[in-house]
Image (cartoon, rainbow, N blue to C red):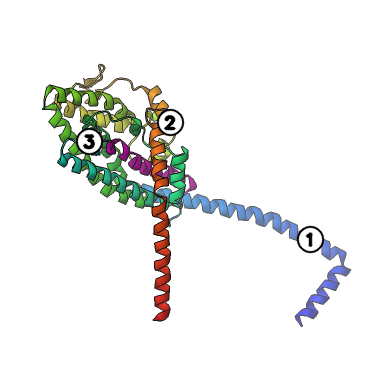
Amino acid sequence: MVRQSQSKLSRFLRNDKKTLNFVRFAFKKIIKKVIPLKQNIMETTEINLEEHFQNKIDSEIRIEPKDWMPDAYRKTLIRQISQHAHSEIVGMLPEANWITRAPTLNRKKILLAKVQDEAGHGLYLYCAAETLGVTRDETINDLHSGKAKYSSIFNYPTLTWADMGAIGWLVDGAAILNQVPLCRASYGPYARAMVRICKEESFHQRQGYELMMKLAQGSPEQKAMAQDAFNRWWWPTLMMFGPKDAESGNTELSMKWRIKRFTNDELRQRFVDVSIPQAEYLGLTIPDPDLKFNEETGHYEFGEIDWDEFWKVVKGNGACNKERVETRKKAFDDGAWVREAATVYHEKRKLREEQNRKTV
């Protein structure tokens, strides 16, 4: 019956050209109206999703991996979290340089624990980055190829034992100021990873300051060593907060999306205000002739940072840039057998579990 009706309709349409032309005309008109309508619906849906997303951000509701998010938000997080992870891993190298030369067994244990913590921080953060759809291999390849950056501070050499104290006190102190607000970042996995990281960074900062105190209260040679380390690490630590706000291309969106809570310059100023009294307590001289306290603002005013040096290091031309990356690449290549063995073990275990299920 259906076939007969279709056959009659086909004959009717073939015999009536006017009807056929009308059907074609009507079909084109419908298509012209439907396609823009579909596009408008898609655009409206996209706008609604973005509005809903921003409303969640503004309401302090965490964004989770399965939630809808703008592509720019995802890319910003991948860049920041992977860069943070790289910084933790590369940051192990300057201090690992002194593990075998620590002056006492206790100092060696403390330094070993600290370096081990940094490795764990990197793993937490790589896992957080993976929730955004990027693989571990992709992030590590970006580091090895130079596409991804890490904190500029780790491209400076550790020349004396006092550098271990300066890094713990200044570098980890700066990291705490930067990372504690990240515990309230809008992206859930990142914020949760930062809670434990910040607790361990607090230990790192305290042991660094305690080491500097011992040196500052020691022999004239030890105090001179502490002052020398302070002189060399002060300005690179201020650079660690990133470029000036006016030159930062990522700050505006990161603040809007509440990935960051404070700008680079705000964090840098807070670090200076906190660190100067600590340095004075140690009896160290701040290596900044322009430093002065402003009674009206309640803040310290400090000299101009050498931004040429900052950008030189960021672009890969610092004292240790090439050495750091080459060391990481070598470690990755040397560890290939471990990854292969782990993969084979996983496959064998999976096969054994399948055989056991069949037996049962």
Q: Which residue is mark 1?
A: 24
Residue positioned 31% across, 44% down in the render:
182
Give me the C-alpha separation between circle 3 and circle 1: 86 Å
Q: Nearer the viewer, residue 22 or 11?
A: 11
The x, y position of residue 48, in whole percent, is 49, 52
Q: Crowding near pointer 3: few (<14 within 10 Å), some, many (20+)?
A: few
Which residue is under mark 3? 101
Q: Nearer the viewer, mark 2 or mark 1?
A: 2
Q: Residue furthest right?
A: 15
Q: Is residue 97 magenta?
A: yes
- Which amino acid, by three-letter code, is at mark 2? Gly
Quarter of the figure that contains the C terminus: bottom left
Identify the mark at residue 316; answer none if there is no mark: 2
Quarter of the figure with residue 285: top left
What type is the residue that disc 1 sits on? Arg
2 falls in the magenta region: no
**First along the sequence among labels 2 and 1:** 1
Q: Residue furthest bottom?
A: 1
Q: Quadrant of the N terminus?
A: bottom right
Magenta stretch secondary structure, dominant: helix
Element at label 1: helix
Residue positioned 42% across, 73% down in the render:
354
Q: Secondary structure at mark 2?
A: loop
> Dot 2, crowdedness within 10 Å: few (<14), some or many (≥20)?
some
Q: Magenta region: which residues? A: 69-98
Of 88 and 104, nearer the camera is 104
The picture quadrant where one finds residue 320 is top left
